[in-house]
Amino acid sequence: MTGAFAGMMADSKRPTVLLCDAAFSAVPILIALKRSGYRVAVCGSRPADPGHALADLSLVMDYGDRDSLLRATSREGIEFLVPGCTDISYLSCAWVASQLRLPGYDRPETTALLHKKDKFRELCRKHGFATPRSVSSPSQASALTFPIMVKPSDSFSGRGIIKVDHPGELESAIEYSKVLRGSESIVIEEFIEGNLYSHSAFLRDGKIAVDFFVNEFCTVHPYQVNSSHLCVELDGKVVRGLREWLESFATTLELTDGLVHTQFVSSGGSFYLIEVMRRCPGDLYALLIAKSTGVPYAQLYASAFCGLAVARIENPRVSKFFSRHTVSVPQECVFLSSRIELRNASISFVPLKKTGETLRAVPMDRAGIYFIEHSTAKEMAEITPKLKNYVAVETLENV
């Protein structure tokens, strides 16, 4: 695949790609694009973000401003537009791509369905896709079995999500959720007890070209993933079911080639869809896949937006046993340092906070990301759910 990428770049004029995200999570995408020979521009409103220093062209601007992004894309001669690791980036890029007929994006109405939880739930109900039972208004909540979940329709990283155990708590939970996210549109659905996973699949001609299943754990904030590893064991019925659903889903919506990332809960041999997105997951998810399997996830992701066919990779194998852990804290503090106390493991750390900076409470912030290589799959599976117990965060408040 790398050779095919490189061969396309033999021309003296390098195509210019605009990556709409300069933050740390988008850096693997930026590096993949540069290694493939593109001239890479980035945009983002924070000049200190690493992408601005690494790119060939830096545009300090708010990519959420769609009109400004459209003007910049036209002005700078951008040939391909690649979204980063945020919903805002993807939605803005999709809109601009629809105006300029750039590759890699679904129809605007499809994009709207996938990136709003309430619209996605309506779609699933219509087609009988496996999601938790939900209702469209608080007055219908009595039809659900408690506990239930209240979620802003545009929630991400667990923000504004509240579990409601009793009907009497529902009204206050809805108001609190709206305040947290500033959103009037909400989803009310039954809580499903089970194990959380993600399924990252790359489509080619409506079929899965390559896919990955990841165990996910929320151990600091109940609805934000902070620890994960590639699956080494998952019920075959669930695996087959997810794959069959996705290809049916792709046909139903006529999805374009590229990534479909699904979060789901597995319970008793069944699965329940939580959310689906077409952007790259954050917190260096791409590196977890690459380190564990050797598959260049970020390059696969970018290829569809650059007008290239997604490479087919048969049965990617988990060849190394990596955990990913995002360092977060339950209360706001002044960050000093972080360390992890594990023996017989190879550890790398991507710092996101400097000594003396404020570290906001989860789910609003993180201090850094650890990648831990274990010697066996068994060790990885045993330690990953407990990683927060091995991580120490030194703050001004606890020295």
Image (tube, rainbow, N blue to C red):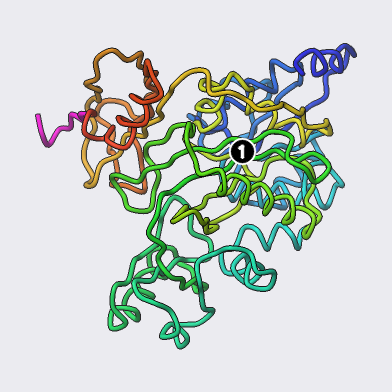
Q: Is residue 234 left or right of residue 337?
A: right
Residue at horizontal 65 percent and vertical 58 percent from the top: 114
Residue nearest the observer in this picture, 16 or 268: 268
Q: From this view, report whether residue 379 is shown above or below residue 285.
A: above
Q: From this view, report whether residue 275 is shown above or below residue 142.
A: above
Residue at horizontal 68 percent and vertical 41 percent from the top: 259
Counting from the top left corner in percent of width and height, residue 295 is at: 63, 22
| Region in magenta | 392-399
Q: Is residue 188 left or right of residue 80?
A: left
Q: Could you say which quadrant of the image residue 377 lies in?
A: top left
Look at label 1 and name its amino acid. Answer: Gly
Counting from the top left corner in percent of width and height, residue 28 is at: 58, 25
Q: Quadrant of the C terminus?
A: top left
Let me know if residue 251 is in the magenta part: no
- Badge 1 is on which residue? 84
Counting from the top left corner in percent of width and height, residue 131 is at: 55, 64
Residue nearest the observer in this picture, 232 or 253: 232
Mark 1, secondary structure of its residue: loop
Q: Quadrant of the N terminus?
A: top right
Counting from the top left corner in percent of width and height, residue 329 is at: 25, 41
Q: Is residue 145 left or right of residue 76?
A: left
The crowd level at tag 1 (other Cα within 10 Å; few <14, some 14-19, many 20+) is many
Let me know if residue 396 is in the magenta part: yes
Q: Could you say which quadrant of the image residue 55 lies in?
A: top right
Residue situated furthest bottom in the rendering: 139
Residue at horizontal 52 percent and vertical 20 percent from the top: 291
